[in-house]
Amino acid sequence: MTAVREERIARELRRLRGKYTSADVQRALGITPSKLSRIESCKVRPSSQDVRRLATFYGADADAVERLAEAAEDLKRPVWWTEFIGPDWSEALAYHLDLESEATRIDSWTIDLVPGLLQTRDYSAALMTSRVDVPSEQLERRLALRERRQERVRNGTLELWAILSEAVLCGQIGGPDVLRGQLEYLAEPPANVTVQILPFTAGAHSGLGTSFHLLAFADWPTVGYQDTIQQGLYYDDPDVVNGLTRTIDDVRATALSPSASREMLARRATELKGE
């Protein structure tokens, strides 16, 4: 799996190359066709020197050359999640964090859980300890990472639109008190967060049976994501992404309005006080 930042550089170099063949590049710069192919397919991280030479040869203007070279240099710098790496770390998680960090908007449709970026600490902890006995140090690291990921929600730099099945309001993750706290938070979300509830009374709809998320970027095609017990599944095929977009738009149109959804969330939270 390739980081968005690397893909962005590779895509721009492919675009700039235009009419030039790999043989042209080798004659002019001494970069072999195999190395050029690895750079353009993200099989190897390009050096800022190679990026600068390639972009200059392709005829990019000085500002574009420096932007690309700086982006390549930036790949060497530690990413923010380095401090959270532990025994349970995986490259798949790093890839997801890279996508999430670059996204400008995430649309979610979930049938049984609150999306991670909107979970309260207690709700997250209940989920993280539900399947296995998680050591306390590992649990704290996971919770700290979750809270760090949520910073963009709190500071307004990430737009979220979450559509939840009414079933999410019924599954007592962590017990009634934990669920109540979670629903109270969703009933009064930050300004950059929109929450809708799809009630049971909606009947059949195109989103039945699966949860998924769509990550949109300022200068990158939308990516679809589904979480599974084993691993996350990512979709960048335009036809698949378009299908997911149609589904989430259909669910969005069928769900309660944001204001009616907030009322339902607040009402359910009040009911939980007596349970």
Image: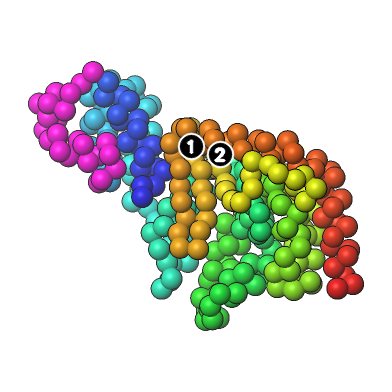
22 in magenta: yes
**Which residue in the structure is indicated by mark 1?**
240
Q: Position of residue 35 (x, y in %)?
A: 17, 39
**What kind of colouring is applied to the model shown?**
rainbow
216 in magenta: no
In this orientation, which residue lies closer to the viewer: 88 or 237?
237
**Residue drawn at the location 27% of the way across and 39% of the way down:** 41
Q: Position of residue 121 (x, y in %)?
A: 67, 67
Q: Three-letter amino acid code at disc 1? A: Val
Q: Tell me which segment is drawn in magenta.
A: 19-44
Q: Position of residue 228 (x, y in %)?
A: 51, 58
Residue 104 visible in the snapshot:
no
In this orientation, which residue lies closer to the viewer: 251 or 75?
251
**Residue drawn at the location 68% of the way across and 42% of the way down:** 205
Q: Position of residue 64 (x, y in %)?
A: 37, 27
**Residue drawn at the location 60% of the way across and 74% of the way down:** 130
Q: Three-letter amino acid code at disc 2? A: Leu
Q: Are marks 2 and 1 in contact (CB under 8 Å)?
A: yes
Q: Does the magenta stretch mainly form a helix, a strand or a loop?
A: helix
Residue 138 visible in the snapshot:
yes
**Which residue in the structure is indicated by mark 2?**
244
